[in-house]
Every structure is written in C-alpha cells, then in structure tokens.
Image: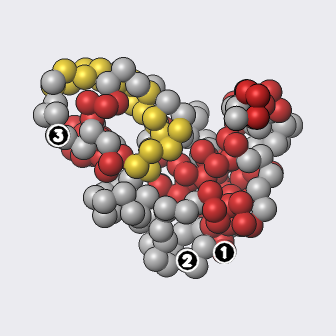
C-alpha cells in the first residue's frame, strides 16, 4: 500500500505492507530509532509518539493508519539545537536511569501537559499510566513533568513552548460533554 506521512516535519511517501507496524516503519524505514520497541503489546509505552499532536503507542498502530497524518517522534522535538522544555526538565531532574522508557515518557508527558498546565503529583502519575519505567521509581519523572509545566508557562520561554489559556480552552469539550 502507498502511504504519505509527515514525520518530524518531513513528508515521506512509501510503499508498505499493510501489516507493518508504525514503530517498525519509523525505526526501519526512516531510522527514527529514538522510538523504542519495548513490548509490542502496548503495555509499556516505550514506543509512544504523537499522531496529529496526541500520544499513541506506535506498536499498536499500522503504518497505513498514519497515512495523511502528522507524526512527531522524540527526534522531532528539539528546535534550533535546543531541547524541548520537557526534554530539558527530564535531564535537569535526573528523570532517567537506563533511558529505555524516556522517549515514550517524554512524548506522553507533552500530551499530558497540553491538557494540564499545572498538574499535581496524582495528575502526573495518572497521566503517565501505561508508560512503564523499571528503574527510577517515578518520583524524578513526576518532578520533571511538574518542572516542565513551569518552564512552559506563559512568559517562561519561546511562545511555541508555552501553555496558553486559549489552547487549553480549545481542547475542552463543548457543552460539558
């Protein structure tokens, strides 16, 4: 099958087998090896990427399902040689040990912070459910997500990385649904 997918700002057109998983397409065809193959069952979250701005587990999605969509991987987060605020917060707060889960955790954390601009510990832990870390015990990961939220507040950095009340309000369901 023919697909056209925008990955990290670059459009790729390829022929793929209908059963090719997105994680394998990203790693094997596009050399986006930051997207990790963890469990192939959707349980660990190591393969988390963004599809049209929302986190998905790329081991649970076929590449053909990404046809016509925008995919962002961990490699696509840095801008002008600068780490994304969530990446920087993970580094500053020692929120990794072996690093295997880190790309998926960061991608999930960015999705969480798009909806929750000032999450408490419980909100972060709930928002990261489905992303497993076997090393850290999560405390530094929670701290990093909260630090990233502060870094992304209006006035804290480049506009593209900031939360805005309009962006958060636009994601809320209409009519309380």
Marks 2 and 1, Cα distance to the nearest angstrom?
Answer: 7 Å
Assign the N terminus to one quadrant of the image: top left
Residue 149 vertical position relative to residue 114 in the rendered view, above or below: below
Q: Residues within 10 Å of mark 3 (few under 14, many from 20)?
A: few
Question: Viewer-nearest of labels 2 and 3?
Answer: 3
Q: Nearer the viewer, residue 127 or 150?
A: 127
Residue 143 vertical position relative to residue 147 in the rendered view, above or below: below
Q: Residue at x 39, y 63 (%)?
A: 43
Q: Residues within 10 Å of mark 1 (few under 14, many from 20)?
A: few
* Quadrant in the rendering for residue 145: bottom right
Q: Residue at x 41, y 64 (%)?
A: 44
Location of mark 3 (residue): 19
Q: Looking at the image, how many numbered discs can be counted on the residues?
A: 3
Q: Is residue 6 left or right of residue 74?
A: left
Helix, strand or loop at label 3? It is loop
Circles 2, 1 touching at the beta carbon (< 8 Å): yes
Query: Could you tell me residue 92's position as x and y percent?
Result: 67, 63
Q: Residue at x 74, y 67 (%)?
A: 121
Q: Earlier in the sequence, mark 2 or mark 3?
A: 3
Location of mark 1 (residue): 139
Q: Is residue 151 visible?
A: no
Helix, strand or loop at label 1? It is helix
Q: Is residue 5 visible?
A: yes
Marks 1 and 3, Cα distance to the nearest angstrom?
Answer: 38 Å
Q: Residue at x 66, y 71 (%)?
A: 140
Residue 6 vertical position relative to residue 98 in the rendered view, above or below: above
Q: Is residue 15 left or right of residue 47?
A: left
Query: Could you tell me residue 47's position as x and y percent?
Result: 38, 53
* Quadrant in the rendering for residue 6: top left
Could you say which disc has been placed on residue 136 in the image?
2
């Amino acid at each position: 099958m023919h697909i056209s997918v925008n990955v990290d700002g670059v459009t790729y057109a390829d022929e793929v087998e209908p059963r090719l998983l997105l994680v394998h397409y990203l790693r094997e065809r596009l050399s986006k090896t930051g997207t990790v193959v963890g469990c192939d069952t959707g349980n660990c979250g190591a393969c988390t990427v963004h599809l049209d701005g929302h986190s998905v587990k790329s081991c649970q999605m076929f590449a053909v399902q990404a046809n016509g969509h925008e995919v962002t991987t961990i490699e696509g987060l840095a801008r002008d040689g600068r780490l994304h605020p969530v990446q920087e917060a993970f580094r500053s707060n020692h929120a990794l040990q072996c690093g295997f889960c880190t790309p998926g955790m960061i991608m999930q954390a960015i999705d969480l912070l798009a909806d929750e601009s000032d999450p408490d510990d419980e909100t972060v832990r709930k928002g990261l459910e489905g992303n497993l870390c076997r090393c850290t015990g999560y405390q530094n990961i929670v701290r990093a997500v909260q630090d990233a939220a502060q870094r992304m507040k209006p006035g804290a950095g480049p506009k593209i990385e900031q939360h805005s009340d309009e962006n958060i309000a636009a994601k809320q369901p209409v009519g309380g649904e």
